[in-house]
Image (cartoon, rainbow, N blue to C red):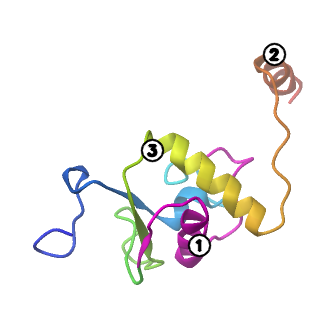
Amino acid sequence: MSARGTMVTKDEGKYVLYPCYFDNQRARPPRRVPQALAVRNPSAEEVAKAALALGLTPVLEKGRAHPSRPWERNGRVLVDVRGEKLALLRQLAAKLREQRGQAPPPRQSGQQRAASQRKA
C-alpha cells in the first residue's frame, strides 16, 4: 500500500479489481469482461472469494469506490500481479459464474460470432 493509504500503483505489484468490472448490468467501461462472462451485481466479497479459489492472495478493501463512480462505495480487491490483467479478469469472471452455479457461455468461433452479429 502506498504511504497515503489510498492509491495503489502498478509499481507496488498489485492489480486493483472493482466489482463493476464483472457486472453484466454495466456498460463498457467500467465493465471489463464480455457481457457473456459477466454476472449480475457482484460484490467485492464474491470477487475476493473467486480470487482465493484461483490461488491468488486477495486483499478486500471495503468502502472503496471506482474512480468514475465515487458515490458507489462497493469496495475493491487487490491481488498480486500475475500475467496479463485481462486474462486474469476473464478467469475471475468464469470463477464468479461457477460460484453462482451459472453455466459458462458457449464458445463461438470468429465466423459464428460474425454470423450471429449480422443476423441481429
Query: How packed is label 2: few (under 14 Cα within 10 Å), some, or many (20 or more)?
Result: few
At a point 52% along the width and 47% down the height, the residue shown is: 88
Reading the image, the residue beneath label 3 is 85
Which element type, helix, strand or loop, lies under badge 3?
helix
Reading the image, the residue beneath label 1 is 49
At a point 84% along the width and 66% down the height, the residue shown is: 101
* Quadrant hosting residue 109: top right
Which element type, helix, strand or loop, lies under badge 1?
helix
**What amino acid type should be assigned to the residue bearing mark 2?**
Gln
Say which label, 2 or 3, has the lower sequence index.
3
Of all residues shown, which one is farthest toward the right?
119
In the depicted structure, whether residue 46 falls above or below residue 55: below
The N terminus appears in which quarter of the rendering? Answer: bottom left
Q: Tell me the CA gap for discs 2 and 1.
A: 35 Å
Q: Tell me the CA gap for discs 3 and 1.
A: 18 Å
User: Can residue 109 be seen in the rendering of this structure?
Assistant: yes
